[in-house]
Every structure is written in C-alpha cells, then in structure tokens.
Amino acid sequence: MIYRALTIAGSDNSGGAGIQADLKVFSAFGVYGMSAITAITVQNSLGVHQSIPVSPETVYSQIEAVVTDIGIDAFKTGMLQTEDNVLAVAEAVKKFEMKNFVCDTVIKSKNGRYLLDKNAVNSFIKKIIPLTDVITPNIDEAEVLTGIQIKTVQDMKRAAKELVKMGVKLAVVKGGHLPQENTITDVVYDGREYLLLRYPLVKTKNTHGTGCTFSAAITSCLSKGLSPLKAIRVARAYVQGAIENALSTGKGTGSLNHFWTVE
C-alpha cells in the first residue's frame, strides 16, 4: 500500500527546513511525498536572506495536479508568504475536499525575517485556521495568532484553547521557546482535555527546521491512518531523536538529522 502526503510550503535551498525537510521526513516514515512550492528562499545556516513568492495561480495548479491524479492521504502547509497564496491554498483545500490538514504556522524565521506577510495574517486566521485539523505553532506564533501573551504553561493552555475556538480541531502549542528546568513542555488541546508532552531540553544550536520536521512527521502518521493524538505522540518522539542526533551543517544553526532512526 502506498501512503501519500503533500507539503505546501517554501523551498529551503540549504536543505534543513521547508519542502526539502518535509520530503526527507516523509521518506523516513515510508510515505510517498509530493510538493507544491509557495516560495523560493535564499538561505543557509546563518538565516533567510531572500524570499520570492510563487504566484497563487501556480500554487493552486500544483495542488490540483497532484490531488486530482495521484491523490493524497494527508497534507501540511508551511510557509505561504503572501495573502494571495493564503487564499489560493484555502480555495484548493475546499475545492478538492482535502482531508487530514496539518498547519505549521510559519510566520517568522529565527533571524526575524517575516515569512508570512503582515497583511496576510488576518486572512490566514480567517481562511486557513478553520480548515485545519492539527495546528502546531510555537509560542511566538501562538501569540501572534491569538493575541495572548505567553509566559507560562498555563498561558500555553489558554492559547491552545483559543485556537480551537477559532476553528482548529486540535492545537499543539510547542514549548521550545519556554524551557523549564531543562524540560520542554508541549501543550495539546482537542477541545475537551489537555495533554502535556514533556521532553528533556537538548542543549544544541542545531535546531534548523524543527517546526517543519514536527508537522511533516504528524502528516506522515496521519497519512498512515494513525489517530491525531497518536500521530502527535509519535511525531514528537521522532523530533526528539532528530534533535538529539542533529547535524552541524554550516557556520550557524545546523539541521536536524531526519534519518536518525535508520542509522
């Protein structure tokens, strides 16, 4: 049986994040990966230096081409960059009745460059979030989307609950930017109860592509028929190993090791 997953995201020419990371993760999980590129970035381990959006017509056509021919079992979005691309993706998701949607809320890069235009945030909230099955913001992104200032795990819970109120079926607010006594806590909320996932903080600078990797791993698991909560648990454990075995690529922030499970 072929498990099929689609990533709708930007291209990271350094290979650590974006489309390139997503396809590596799909392969690591034994899933057939496809892509719709939303932007071409110029980046390396030192940061994102330039980003050129793909036209919304081309983004839509890429999605249409694979969905109507090969088909998909799950899909994810990453960097969308422009409001027009946000609208094009939302239209495609509805038009082709695309299921098992994992939204990686790519808003800013580690060096502070906006990867989602500021004028696109409201459209993202109104058009993308209500279609989403699983959303995976970090603390900074959750603050932008919900308007809630996050300083504690309790604040993370409030933000996760707000995201579900906004239309998401299941929210995962990641705690990587809020370590507590060498522990990372991720908050999962499904509209009924909270689940706290706790993992040891890995002291490494090589974390490029963590968000892409996590969301792609969830997408892989959903494509193979796992429940959302099980998919999140498996994906989080996979990411922990990928960070613990991270690669020192370049002079700055190195990449995760997406194939650590087979080494």
Image: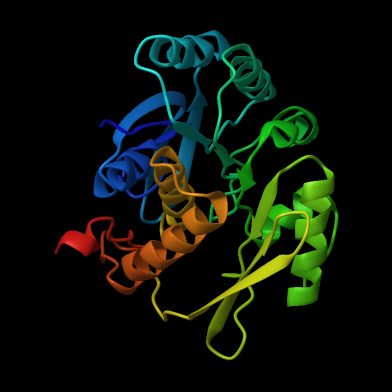
Q: Position of residue 114 (x, y in %)?
A: 62, 43
Indicate the quadrant where residue 157 lies.
bottom right
Q: Position of residue 144 (x, y in %)?
A: 77, 51
Residue, far left: 263
Indicate the quadrant where residue 196 lies.
bottom right
Q: Position of residue 101 (x, y in %)?
A: 57, 35
The reply to whether residue 164 is in sight is yes
Left or right? Give the position of 165 relative to 195. Answer: right
Instruction: Identify the residue at image location x=41%, y=67%.
Output: 237
* Above-or-below relation of 42 to 192: above
Q: Position of residue 134 (x, y in %)?
A: 61, 46
Left or right? Give the position of 44 relative to 156. Answer: left
In what quadrant of the picture does the N terminus appear?
top left
Instruction: Identify the residue at image location x=22%, y=56%.
Output: 259
Q: Nearer the viewer, residue 164 or 159?
A: 164
Give the color scheme: rainbow, by chain, secondary structure or one colour: rainbow
In what quadrant of the picture does the C terminus appear?
bottom left
Instruction: Identify the residue at image location x=37%, y=63%.
Output: 238
